[in-house]
Image: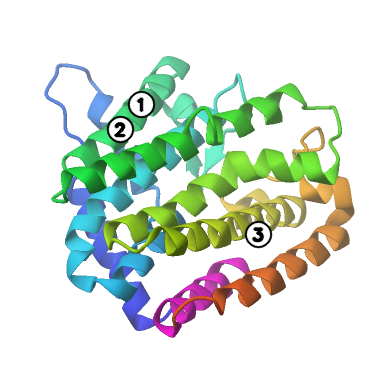
């Protein structure tokens, strides 16, 4: 990873750990459960997309943007905790560590997910940004992480398990479940630096393609890596609507290369200062 991007991510990681919620109570493990998933690591891909946009245009706004980047990571983490629950994937491993319902119990995992969901919006409301910006950011996160986005994708994923979808239907599922929050991360960076609406939409559209690429890559990892290599259960999604199950591993790899080409073409609609940052992230995480 390039030095500047690496330093940006390190600074964000430090901010995240310093600002994890600490709640006064006599519950024996509530605070630890709130922070366990963050201490387990993670790519921080969504926060980094937001921070790269901000850094490309208004680097002085990075400290304020950390609050919003953390909000996105909290909402994403809530979704992972709930996705791992027995009622969904019943996963025992996440990021190389036991999942929360395994470490504690289902009640604790469910409530921690709920808490991180709501606290993500508090992080934005408390950010040192203008009121109009914060309203726009909250709206964007709610739209893409809620009923019209990630939750819709999860609902479709669960309802149609064991029922194969077409490629268009599968893409719709994962645009909602995965890609919209990634796209929102880029658009929210654009909102922070006050880019015009046309540029915000361009970044959102590129983000949707990056999000689909991210999902295809995840499906390929699931189909080709061991749990130890991936840090989570793998090769257990035979009933899932995945790109590898629908297209085969070779077909999914071809779809991945097609998306990379489409994204690289769209990136040339951006200024060099941002295009190069995004090209680097795609090279580092998704190729």
| Mark 3 crowdedness (10 Å alpha carbons): few <14, some 14-19, many ≥20 | many
Q: Is residue 18 magenta?
A: no
Where residue 82 sits in the image (x, y, percent)? 50, 28
Q: Is residue 192 left or right of residue 259?
A: left
User: Does the residue at mark 2 contact the one at mark 3 (Cβ under 8 Å)?
Assistant: no
Q: Which mark is residue 112?
A: 1
| Mark 2 crowdedness (10 Å alpha carbons): few <14, some 14-19, many ≥20 | many
Q: Is residue 252 left or right of residue 26?
A: right
- In primary-sequence order, the first of circles 2 and 3 is 2
Where residue 173 sits in the image (x, y, percent)? 69, 38
Magenta residues, dominant SS class? helix
**Camera-nearest label, 1 or 3:** 3
Q: Is residue 153 left or right of residue 273?
A: right
- Provide the residue designation for mark 3: 213
Give SS at disc 1.
helix
Is residue 254 visible in this depiction of the protein?
Answer: yes
Q: At 69% across and 31% down in the image, what residue appears? A: 157
Is residue 84 visible in this depiction of the protein?
Answer: no
Q: Is residue 117 left or right of residue 250?
A: left
Q: At 15% across and 16% down in the image, what residue appears? A: 26
Question: Where is the C terminus found, in terms of image quarters?
Answer: bottom right
Please, is residue 22 above or below residue 246 in the view? Answer: above
Question: Where is the N terminus found, in terms of image quarters?
Answer: bottom left
- Provide the residue designation for mark 2: 34
Please, is residue 78 above or below residue 215 in the view? Answer: above
Where residue 155 sits in the image (x, y, percent)? 64, 25
Q: State how far apart marks 2 and 3 are (Cα).
A: 30 Å
Asked where in the image residue 207 lies, by quadrant, the reply is bottom right
Asked where in the image residue 253 lies, by quadrant, the reply is bottom right
Specify start and end residues of the magenta stretch as a single range.
Answer: 272-286
């Amino acid at each position: 990873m390039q030095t500047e991007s690496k330093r940006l991510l390190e600074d964000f990681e430090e901010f995240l750990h310093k600002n994890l919620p600490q709640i006064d109570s006599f519950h024996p493990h509530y605070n630890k459960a709130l922070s366990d998933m963050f201490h387990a690591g993670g790519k921080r891909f969504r926060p980094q997309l937001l921070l790269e946009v901000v850094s490309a245009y208004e680097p002085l706004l990075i400290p304020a943007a950390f609050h919003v980047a953390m909000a996105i990571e909290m909402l994403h983490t809530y979704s992972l905790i709930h996705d791992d629950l027995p009622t969904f994937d019943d996963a025992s491993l996440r990021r190389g560590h036991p999942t929360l319902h395994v470490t504690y119990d289902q009640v604790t995992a469910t409530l921690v997910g709920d808490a991180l969901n709501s606290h993500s919006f508090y992080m934005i409301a408390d950010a040192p940004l203008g009121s109009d910006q914060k309203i726009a950011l909250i709206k964007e996160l709610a739209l893409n992480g809620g009923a019209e986005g990630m939750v819709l994708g999860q609902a479709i994923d669960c309802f149609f398990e064991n029922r194969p979808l077409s490629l268009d239907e599968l893409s719709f599922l994962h645009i909602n479940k995965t890609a919209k929050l990634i796209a929102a991360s880029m658009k929210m960076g654009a909102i922070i630096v006050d880019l015009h609406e046309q540029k915000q939409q361009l970044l959102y559209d590129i983000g949707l393609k990056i999000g689909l690429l991210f999902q295809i890559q995840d499906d390929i990892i699931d189909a080709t890596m061991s749990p130890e290599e991936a840090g989570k259960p793998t090769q257990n999604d035979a009933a899932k609507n995945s790109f590898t199950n629908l297209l085969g591993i070779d077909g999914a790899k071809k779809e991945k290369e097609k998306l990379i080409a489409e994204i690289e073409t769209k990136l040339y609609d951006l200024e060099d200062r941002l295009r190069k940052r995004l090209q680097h992230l795609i090279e580092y995480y998704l190729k």
